Image (cartoon, helix red, strand yellow):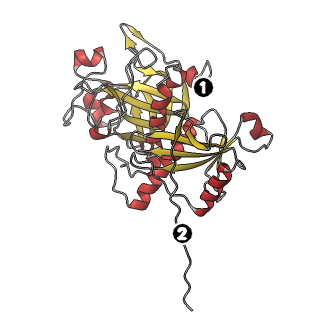
Amino acid sequence: MNIAKSRPVLVCNIGWMARYQGLERQPDSIVGGGKWVDENHHGHECCNFLTMPSGSVFGHFETIKGKVDRKVSIGKLGASDDADSIEHIDVIWVSTEPNGGGRRVIGYYLDAVVYRGRQLHKKPPTSQHKLDKVDSYMVSANTRNVRCLPIEERTLVLGRPPGWIGQANWWFPGHSEHADVPAFMTQVRALLARHCFLGTSRKGSCGANRTSDPERNAQVEAAAVAVVKEFYAAHPIRSVEKDNVGWDLNVFQKSDLDAQKAPFRRVEVKGLSGPDLTVGVTPNEYRYIRLHMDGSLPSYRIAVVTSALSAANLHLLSYDFGQKQWIDEIRNQYVQLEVDEKTAAILTLS
Protein backbone atom coordinates (compact mmCIF):
# COMPACT_ATOMS: atom_id res chain seq x y z
CA MET A 1 0.00 0.00 0.00
CA ASN A 2 1.09 3.56 -0.58
CA ILE A 3 0.12 7.01 0.61
CA ALA A 4 -0.66 9.32 -2.32
CA LYS A 5 0.47 12.91 -2.39
CA SER A 6 0.02 15.35 -5.27
CA ARG A 7 3.03 17.35 -6.42
CA PRO A 8 2.81 21.15 -6.36
CA VAL A 9 1.69 22.70 -9.65
CA LEU A 10 2.99 25.74 -11.52
CA VAL A 11 1.03 27.04 -14.52
CA CYS A 12 3.10 28.83 -17.20
CA ASN A 13 1.78 30.90 -20.11
CA ILE A 14 3.56 30.78 -23.49
CA GLY A 15 2.86 31.52 -27.15
CA TRP A 16 0.63 29.23 -29.21
CA MET A 17 2.38 26.69 -31.45
CA ALA A 18 1.57 23.26 -32.82
CA ARG A 19 4.71 21.33 -31.87
CA TYR A 20 7.24 23.53 -30.02
CA GLN A 21 10.09 21.84 -31.91
CA GLY A 22 11.59 25.10 -33.12
CA LEU A 23 10.74 27.85 -35.64
CA GLU A 24 13.62 28.31 -38.07
CA ARG A 25 13.36 25.77 -40.93
CA GLN A 26 10.40 24.17 -39.12
CA PRO A 27 6.74 23.99 -40.29
CA ASP A 28 5.45 25.90 -37.28
CA SER A 29 4.72 29.45 -36.17
CA ILE A 30 4.10 31.23 -32.88
CA VAL A 31 1.11 33.42 -32.00
CA GLY A 32 0.52 35.36 -28.78
CA GLY A 33 2.37 34.77 -25.55
CA GLY A 34 2.96 38.39 -24.62
CA LYS A 35 4.52 41.62 -25.85
CA TRP A 36 7.87 40.05 -26.76
CA VAL A 37 6.31 37.53 -29.16
CA ASP A 38 3.95 40.14 -30.61
CA GLU A 39 6.86 42.46 -31.43
CA ASN A 40 9.45 39.87 -32.50
CA HIS A 41 7.31 36.99 -33.88
CA HIS A 42 9.60 34.75 -31.89
CA GLY A 43 9.86 33.37 -28.38
CA HIS A 44 12.27 31.16 -26.47
CA GLU A 45 9.38 28.76 -25.78
CA CYS A 46 9.62 27.64 -29.42
CA CYS A 47 11.84 24.70 -28.32
CA ASN A 48 9.93 23.75 -25.17
CA PHE A 49 9.23 20.19 -26.35
CA LEU A 50 12.48 19.54 -28.20
CA THR A 51 14.46 16.70 -26.64
CA MET A 52 18.18 17.10 -25.94
CA PRO A 53 20.69 14.31 -26.71
CA SER A 54 20.93 13.86 -22.93
CA GLY A 55 17.21 13.07 -22.70
CA SER A 56 16.38 16.38 -21.04
CA VAL A 57 13.85 19.01 -22.08
CA PHE A 58 14.24 22.70 -21.26
CA GLY A 59 11.20 24.96 -20.97
CA HIS A 60 10.96 28.73 -21.16
CA PHE A 61 8.31 31.23 -20.12
CA GLU A 62 8.98 34.95 -20.32
CA THR A 63 9.84 36.70 -17.05
CA ILE A 64 11.05 40.05 -18.40
CA LYS A 65 8.79 43.07 -17.87
CA GLY A 66 10.20 46.31 -19.22
CA LYS A 67 13.85 46.29 -18.21
CA VAL A 68 13.41 43.97 -15.23
CA ASP A 69 13.93 40.21 -15.38
CA ARG A 70 11.65 39.12 -12.56
CA LYS A 71 12.20 36.18 -10.21
CA VAL A 72 9.66 33.41 -9.66
CA SER A 73 8.44 33.02 -6.07
CA ILE A 74 9.29 29.33 -5.86
CA GLY A 75 8.74 29.54 -2.11
CA LYS A 76 5.05 29.13 -2.96
CA LEU A 77 5.97 25.70 -4.32
CA GLY A 78 7.80 24.75 -1.14
CA ALA A 79 11.35 26.00 -1.82
CA SER A 80 13.44 27.49 0.97
CA ASP A 81 14.23 31.21 0.88
CA ASP A 82 17.81 30.66 -0.28
CA ALA A 83 17.07 27.96 -2.88
CA ASP A 84 17.76 28.66 -6.54
CA SER A 85 15.42 25.89 -7.70
CA ILE A 86 12.93 23.29 -6.54
CA GLU A 87 12.44 19.73 -7.77
CA HIS A 88 9.37 17.51 -8.13
CA ILE A 89 6.98 20.11 -9.57
CA ASP A 90 4.28 19.50 -12.18
CA VAL A 91 4.37 22.31 -14.74
CA ILE A 92 1.26 22.96 -16.82
CA TRP A 93 1.87 24.88 -20.04
CA VAL A 94 -1.01 27.08 -21.22
CA SER A 95 -1.54 29.33 -24.21
CA THR A 96 -4.29 31.43 -25.76
CA GLU A 97 -6.03 29.80 -28.73
CA PRO A 98 -5.65 32.25 -31.65
CA ASN A 99 -9.27 32.04 -32.83
CA GLY A 100 -10.91 33.23 -29.63
CA GLY A 101 -11.01 29.87 -27.86
CA GLY A 102 -9.58 31.19 -24.61
CA ARG A 103 -6.47 30.22 -22.69
CA ARG A 104 -5.99 26.45 -22.79
CA VAL A 105 -3.73 23.70 -21.48
CA ILE A 106 -1.32 22.77 -24.30
CA GLY A 107 1.03 20.38 -22.50
CA TYR A 108 2.88 19.54 -19.31
CA TYR A 109 6.16 18.59 -17.64
CA LEU A 110 5.82 16.08 -14.81
CA ASP A 111 8.29 15.92 -11.91
CA ALA A 112 10.18 18.95 -13.23
CA VAL A 113 12.76 21.35 -11.81
CA VAL A 114 11.61 24.98 -11.60
CA TYR A 115 14.21 27.75 -11.25
CA ARG A 116 13.85 31.00 -9.38
CA GLY A 117 15.64 32.94 -12.10
CA ARG A 118 16.59 32.61 -15.75
CA GLN A 119 19.17 29.88 -16.48
CA LEU A 120 21.62 30.32 -19.36
CA HIS A 121 22.85 27.51 -21.58
CA LYS A 122 26.66 27.45 -21.71
CA LYS A 123 26.26 26.52 -25.36
CA PRO A 124 23.21 25.74 -27.52
CA PRO A 125 22.07 22.23 -26.53
CA THR A 126 20.91 21.44 -30.09
CA SER A 127 21.38 22.88 -33.56
CA GLN A 128 17.74 23.99 -33.48
CA HIS A 129 18.34 25.99 -30.32
CA LYS A 130 21.24 27.66 -32.11
CA LEU A 131 19.12 28.47 -35.17
CA ASP A 132 16.37 29.95 -32.99
CA LYS A 133 18.85 31.70 -30.66
CA VAL A 134 17.28 30.05 -27.62
CA ASP A 135 19.86 30.53 -24.89
CA SER A 136 17.90 30.35 -21.63
CA TYR A 137 15.27 28.36 -19.74
CA MET A 138 13.20 28.40 -16.54
CA VAL A 139 12.19 24.73 -16.24
CA SER A 140 13.84 21.38 -16.96
CA ALA A 141 12.50 17.82 -17.06
CA ASN A 142 13.12 14.35 -18.46
CA THR A 143 11.61 13.82 -21.89
CA ARG A 144 9.79 10.71 -20.61
CA ASN A 145 7.78 13.00 -18.33
CA VAL A 146 6.60 15.58 -20.83
CA ARG A 147 3.86 15.80 -23.42
CA CYS A 148 2.77 18.41 -25.92
CA LEU A 149 -0.94 18.01 -26.59
CA PRO A 150 -2.06 17.90 -30.22
CA ILE A 151 -4.32 20.81 -31.05
CA GLU A 152 -7.49 18.69 -31.05
CA GLU A 153 -6.79 17.62 -27.44
CA ARG A 154 -6.36 21.15 -26.11
CA THR A 155 -9.80 21.23 -24.54
CA LEU A 156 -9.10 22.34 -20.94
CA VAL A 157 -9.91 26.05 -20.76
CA LEU A 158 -8.84 28.33 -17.93
CA GLY A 159 -11.01 31.03 -16.39
CA ARG A 160 -10.34 34.76 -16.51
CA PRO A 161 -8.77 36.87 -13.76
CA PRO A 162 -9.12 37.71 -10.97
CA GLY A 163 -8.32 34.40 -9.33
CA TRP A 164 -6.76 32.94 -12.47
CA ILE A 165 -3.51 33.57 -14.32
CA GLY A 166 -3.21 37.27 -15.15
CA GLN A 167 -0.54 39.47 -16.73
CA ALA A 168 2.38 37.52 -15.29
CA ASN A 169 3.25 34.42 -17.28
CA TRP A 170 3.27 32.14 -14.23
CA TRP A 171 0.60 31.29 -11.70
CA PHE A 172 0.24 29.18 -8.56
CA PRO A 173 -3.23 27.55 -8.71
CA GLY A 174 -2.75 26.06 -5.25
CA HIS A 175 -2.85 29.59 -3.82
CA SER A 176 -5.97 30.72 -5.69
CA GLU A 177 -9.22 31.23 -3.79
CA HIS A 178 -11.39 31.26 -6.91
CA ALA A 179 -14.26 28.80 -6.52
CA ASP A 180 -13.77 27.26 -9.99
CA VAL A 181 -10.05 26.51 -9.69
CA PRO A 182 -10.43 23.20 -7.76
CA ALA A 183 -12.66 21.78 -10.52
CA PHE A 184 -10.13 22.86 -13.14
CA MET A 185 -7.32 21.22 -11.18
CA THR A 186 -9.32 18.01 -10.92
CA GLN A 187 -9.42 17.92 -14.72
CA VAL A 188 -5.70 18.68 -14.89
CA ARG A 189 -4.89 15.83 -12.49
CA ALA A 190 -6.98 13.47 -14.62
CA LEU A 191 -4.96 14.55 -17.67
CA LEU A 192 -1.68 13.95 -15.86
CA ALA A 193 -2.85 10.55 -14.63
CA ARG A 194 -3.12 9.39 -18.23
CA HIS A 195 0.57 9.99 -18.86
CA CYS A 196 1.85 6.75 -17.34
CA PHE A 197 -0.42 4.75 -19.62
CA LEU A 198 0.01 6.66 -22.89
CA GLY A 199 2.68 5.66 -25.39
CA THR A 200 4.09 9.14 -25.84
CA SER A 201 7.17 9.26 -28.04
CA ARG A 202 10.58 9.73 -26.44
CA LYS A 203 11.19 12.36 -29.12
CA GLY A 204 8.63 14.67 -27.54
CA SER A 205 5.90 13.93 -30.08
CA CYS A 206 2.39 15.23 -29.59
CA GLY A 207 0.90 11.89 -30.61
CA ALA A 208 0.09 8.73 -28.67
CA ASN A 209 0.16 5.10 -29.68
CA ARG A 210 -3.04 3.19 -30.13
CA THR A 211 -4.14 1.11 -27.16
CA SER A 212 -6.18 -2.04 -26.84
CA ASP A 213 -9.40 -2.08 -24.82
CA PRO A 214 -7.74 -3.44 -21.64
CA GLU A 215 -5.13 -0.70 -21.85
CA ARG A 216 -7.80 1.93 -22.35
CA ASN A 217 -9.73 0.58 -19.38
CA ALA A 218 -6.57 0.90 -17.30
CA GLN A 219 -6.20 4.50 -18.46
CA VAL A 220 -9.79 5.29 -17.50
CA GLU A 221 -9.46 3.70 -14.05
CA ALA A 222 -6.13 5.42 -13.35
CA ALA A 223 -7.53 8.79 -14.40
CA ALA A 224 -10.59 8.28 -12.19
CA VAL A 225 -8.47 7.36 -9.17
CA ALA A 226 -6.36 10.49 -9.76
CA VAL A 227 -9.49 12.65 -9.78
CA VAL A 228 -10.66 11.20 -6.46
CA LYS A 229 -7.21 11.58 -4.90
CA GLU A 230 -7.17 15.21 -5.97
CA PHE A 231 -10.60 15.72 -4.36
CA TYR A 232 -9.23 14.35 -1.08
CA ALA A 233 -5.81 16.02 -1.54
CA ALA A 234 -5.91 17.51 1.97
CA HIS A 235 -6.03 14.02 3.50
CA PRO A 236 -3.59 11.09 3.63
CA ILE A 237 -4.74 8.34 1.26
CA ARG A 238 -3.86 4.67 1.11
CA SER A 239 -4.58 2.64 -1.99
CA VAL A 240 -6.14 -0.75 -1.26
CA GLU A 241 -7.06 -1.47 -4.88
CA LYS A 242 -5.12 -4.74 -4.93
CA ASP A 243 -6.22 -5.94 -1.49
CA ASN A 244 -9.72 -7.08 -2.52
CA VAL A 245 -11.34 -5.39 0.47
CA GLY A 246 -14.40 -4.18 -1.44
CA TRP A 247 -13.28 -0.62 -2.16
CA ASP A 248 -10.23 1.15 -3.62
CA LEU A 249 -9.06 3.96 -1.33
CA ASN A 250 -8.80 4.52 2.41
CA VAL A 251 -8.97 8.23 3.24
CA PHE A 252 -7.77 9.34 6.68
CA GLN A 253 -7.92 12.36 8.88
CA LYS A 254 -4.28 13.37 9.42
CA SER A 255 -4.28 12.57 13.14
CA ASP A 256 -6.07 9.26 12.57
CA LEU A 257 -3.35 7.98 10.24
CA ASP A 258 -0.66 8.58 12.86
CA ALA A 259 -2.77 6.86 15.50
CA GLN A 260 -3.50 3.89 13.21
CA LYS A 261 -7.22 4.58 13.41
CA ALA A 262 -9.76 3.44 10.83
CA PRO A 263 -10.24 5.58 7.70
CA PHE A 264 -13.02 8.15 7.78
CA ARG A 265 -13.84 7.36 4.12
CA ARG A 266 -13.71 4.05 2.27
CA VAL A 267 -14.07 4.93 -1.40
CA GLU A 268 -14.94 2.63 -4.27
CA VAL A 269 -13.81 4.33 -7.51
CA LYS A 270 -15.49 3.75 -10.87
CA GLY A 271 -14.14 5.37 -14.01
CA LEU A 272 -16.12 5.84 -17.21
CA SER A 273 -14.85 7.07 -20.57
CA GLY A 274 -18.21 8.60 -21.50
CA PRO A 275 -20.86 10.73 -19.78
CA ASP A 276 -23.38 7.96 -18.99
CA LEU A 277 -23.72 7.07 -15.30
CA THR A 278 -23.88 3.29 -15.50
CA VAL A 279 -21.27 1.16 -13.72
CA GLY A 280 -20.75 -2.48 -12.93
CA VAL A 281 -19.75 -3.79 -9.51
CA THR A 282 -18.38 -7.14 -8.42
CA PRO A 283 -20.25 -9.33 -5.92
CA ASN A 284 -17.72 -8.33 -3.25
CA GLU A 285 -18.19 -4.62 -4.00
CA TYR A 286 -21.97 -5.01 -4.00
CA ARG A 287 -21.79 -6.68 -0.59
CA TYR A 288 -20.22 -3.55 0.89
CA ILE A 289 -22.71 -1.31 -0.89
CA ARG A 290 -25.48 -3.24 0.87
CA LEU A 291 -23.67 -2.89 4.21
CA HIS A 292 -23.48 0.86 3.61
CA MET A 293 -27.20 0.99 2.79
CA ASP A 294 -28.23 -0.81 5.97
CA GLY A 295 -26.13 1.55 8.10
CA SER A 296 -23.36 -0.92 8.97
CA LEU A 297 -20.63 0.91 6.99
CA PRO A 298 -21.34 4.67 7.09
CA SER A 299 -17.82 5.59 5.91
CA TYR A 300 -18.35 3.95 2.51
CA ARG A 301 -18.60 6.09 -0.64
CA ILE A 302 -18.99 5.38 -4.35
CA ALA A 303 -16.97 7.77 -6.52
CA VAL A 304 -17.98 7.73 -10.18
CA VAL A 305 -15.86 9.73 -12.63
CA THR A 306 -17.46 10.22 -16.03
CA SER A 307 -15.50 11.30 -19.14
CA ALA A 308 -12.40 10.41 -17.16
CA LEU A 309 -9.98 10.86 -20.06
CA SER A 310 -11.27 14.25 -21.16
CA ALA A 311 -13.52 16.59 -19.14
CA ALA A 312 -13.56 14.54 -15.95
CA ASN A 313 -16.71 14.89 -13.82
CA LEU A 314 -16.82 13.49 -10.28
CA HIS A 315 -19.95 12.14 -8.57
CA LEU A 316 -19.52 11.14 -4.92
CA LEU A 317 -22.42 9.00 -3.74
CA SER A 318 -23.50 8.09 -0.22
CA TYR A 319 -26.70 6.62 1.17
CA ASP A 320 -28.90 8.73 3.45
CA PHE A 321 -30.21 6.05 5.78
CA GLY A 322 -32.83 8.37 7.28
CA GLN A 323 -34.30 9.45 3.93
CA LYS A 324 -33.69 6.07 2.27
CA GLN A 325 -32.12 7.84 -0.69
CA TRP A 326 -28.74 8.21 -2.36
CA ILE A 327 -27.16 11.66 -2.37
CA ASP A 328 -24.47 13.13 -4.61
CA GLU A 329 -22.23 14.88 -2.07
CA ILE A 330 -20.50 16.98 -4.73
CA ARG A 331 -23.77 18.55 -5.86
CA ASN A 332 -25.56 18.17 -2.51
CA GLN A 333 -28.65 16.69 -4.14
CA TYR A 334 -30.55 13.43 -3.97
CA VAL A 335 -30.22 11.07 -6.93
CA GLN A 336 -32.10 8.03 -8.12
CA LEU A 337 -29.79 5.01 -8.15
CA GLU A 338 -31.22 2.04 -9.98
CA VAL A 339 -29.76 -1.39 -9.26
CA ASP A 340 -30.02 -4.13 -11.88
CA GLU A 341 -28.93 -7.30 -10.11
CA LYS A 342 -27.34 -10.03 -12.22
CA THR A 343 -27.10 -13.71 -11.36
CA ALA A 344 -23.98 -15.74 -12.12
CA ALA A 345 -23.26 -19.45 -11.85
CA ILE A 346 -20.42 -21.94 -12.13
CA LEU A 347 -21.04 -24.90 -14.45
CA THR A 348 -19.05 -28.11 -14.07
CA LEU A 349 -18.98 -30.98 -16.53
CA SER A 350 -18.71 -34.48 -15.00
Discs 2/1, front: 2
| Relative to 243, 133 lies left or right | left
Q: Amino acid at mark 1?
A: Gly
Q: Residue drawn at (27%, 21%), measured in percent from left and top?
A: 32
Q: Residue drawn at (54%, 69%), measured in percent from left and top?
A: 343
Where residue 282 sits, quadrant-wise, is bottom right
- Circle 2 packing at 10 Å, graded few (<14), some (14-19), many (20+), is few
Query: How far separated are the C-alphas under marks 2 and 1?
Result: 53 Å
Q: Is residue 137 visible?
A: no
Whether 166 is drawn above or below 241: the answer is above
Q: Is residue 48 visible?
A: yes
| Relative to 237, 105 lies left or right | left
Q: Nearer the viewer, residue 349 or 63?
A: 349
Q: Amino acid at mark 2?
A: Thr
> What x and y, as percent, mark residue 89?
52, 32
Where residue 303 sits, quadrant-wise, is top right
Q: Residue drawn at (59%, 24%), measured in percent from left and top?
A: 79
> What x and y, as percent, mark residue 193?
48, 44
Residue extending furthest top? 67
Q: Which residue is mark 1?
A: 78
| Relative to 49, 10 lies left or right | right
Q: Which residue is mark 2?
A: 343
